[in-house]
Amino acid sequence: MQKLVVGNLKMNMESVSQRDTYCKEFKEEFKDLKTDHVVALCPPNIYLEHFCKEFTHTPVIMGAQDCFWELYGSYTGNTSPKTIQSLGAEMVIVGHSERRKYNHETNEDIAQKVAISLRVGIMPIICVGYLDTEDEMESVRAQVNIIVDNFTTDDMENLVFAYEPMWAIGSGKTPTTDEIHTMIMLIRSIVSARHGKDVAENVAILYGGSVVAENVTEVCTNAYADGVLIGRASLSPSNFARIVRMLG
Ligand code: PEP
């Protein structure tokens, strides 16, 4: 089954020369890699235009790491989803736990970002999980509820959820496959209650948090994730390619 494999490069490419080295190595690693899976890269927003141009004639999809909830106006420092779309990017990560934590983004902010992304035709990857101080089930329920309550059944086909427990991000630790599966089923049950079983079965739900080549098969096969959101391991094109290869 086709999986979505998304690399979140975060704020890890501090210089243009690092960016260029990454693009070169990535192309080298992926040039002979035949895969039916969908591979996407989310570089720092400031490099998005460059990545979109570099990867134009490749199957690799580009995404942004965040967007603002308005299309234009006096919002210094923010990125319009329209700009992201016009560069050729096809997706955007919203509600990453690092943005919830450091930028104090609320579920309402994130719902607005989802709305505007869908309006301009880019696919939001909506991260849900929990901060250390919160109850996991309650947090995820609230984060998913606001989406299912405010968006249509058709919208559900154009968005993706990513379950990412914050403690697993960058820590080298992952929940058990049963725990991941339980959370994926929780998300599906919330979608189902509002939009029906068929929609819930089809909505894409990724897992993110310390995914590496050694655990990606387990995550996608035993925990039934529709793909993965990868931070640290995507910073090395060869590790990223190994992950894609593991999925067959
Ligand atoms: C992330 O930042 O979304 C992430 C999953 O990071 P890592 O793979 O490093 O845990």
Image: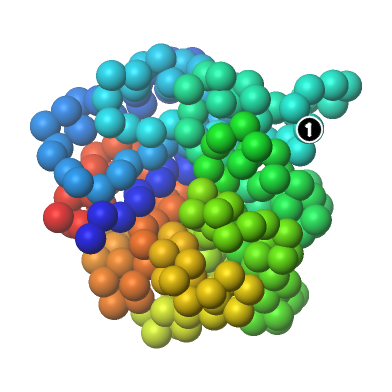
> Image height check: is 17 above or below 3?
above
Give left or right: position of 224 versus 13: left
Q: Quadrant of residue 26?
A: top left
Asked whether residue 177 appears in the rendered view, the answer is yes
Q: What residue is rendered at 56% in x and 35% in y?
A: 121
- The residue pinned by badge 1 equals 70
Q: Position of residue 158 (x, y in %)?
A: 51, 49
* Label 1 beta carbon within 8 A of ligand 1: no
Q: Residue 119 in the image: state x and y as whole percent.
A: 65, 37
Farthest right residue in view: 74
Which quadrant of the rendered structure holds the C terminus? bottom left
Q: Position of residue 74 (x, y in %)?
A: 88, 22
Disc 1 packing (10 Å; few <14; some 14–19; many ≥20): some
In this rendering, position of residue 147 left or right of residue 17: right
Would residue 66 be seen by someone viewing this image from the given angle? no
Q: Seen in the image, is 133 located left or right of residue 240?
A: right
Mark 1: amino acid: Glu
Q: Quadrant of residue 54?
A: top left
Q: Residue at x 34, y 19 (%)?
A: 56
Q: Quadrant of the N terminus?
A: bottom left
Q: Residue at x 51, y 60 (%)?
A: 162
**What residue is rendered at 32% in x and 32% in y?**
60
- Vertical side of 12 occupied by 155: above or below: below
The quarter of the picture where residue 30 lies is top left
Above/below status of 9 relative to 131? above
> Label 1's element?
loop
> Closest to the observer: 73 or 245?
73
